[in-house]
Image (cartoon, rainbow, N blue to C red):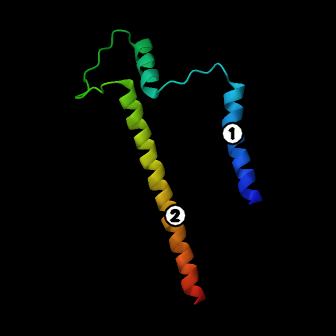
Amino acid sequence: MKKNLFLLFVILLFIIVPLAYNTSSEFAGTDGKAVDAIESINPKYEPWFSNVWELPGGEVESLLFALQAALGAGFIGYFFGLSKGKKNGNKKETLR
């Protein structure tokens, strides 16, 4: 239990300290950064391809991003839970 509390404290420290230390940071997506870099390299650049479907709004884009993150976290959690369950099952089988 002490080990888990220590790990939780360390994780919170890693989250809070950078946010408190760098208060003037601006968080932006990689798409926006890529567009800025391309425009700074070649201001006359015109995209040769456009999306087939444009999202109706920023909220939908955020929803899809959050859904993707939740599915990924669920998959990783399921994988680790299944691996631990198999490991514990094998230990019980060997003890019998």
Q: Is residue 74 left or right of residue 44?
A: right
Pick the residue in front: 73 or 39.
73
Q: Residue 79 appears at what percent x and percent y?
A: 47, 61
Q: Is residue 77 left or right of residue 8?
A: left
Q: Residue 21 appears at what percent x and percent y?
A: 72, 26
Secondary structure at numbered mark 2: helix
Q: Quadrant of the C terminus?
A: bottom right
Pick the residue in front: 41 or 87.
87
Numbered-mark total: 2
Q: Residues within 10 Å of mark 1 (few under 14, many from 20)?
A: few
Residue type indicated by callout 2: Gly
Secondary structure at numbered mark 1: helix
* Residue holding disc 1: 14
Q: Is residue 86 left or right of residue 95?
A: left
Residue 81 numbered tag: 2
Q: Furthest residue to the bottom?
A: 96
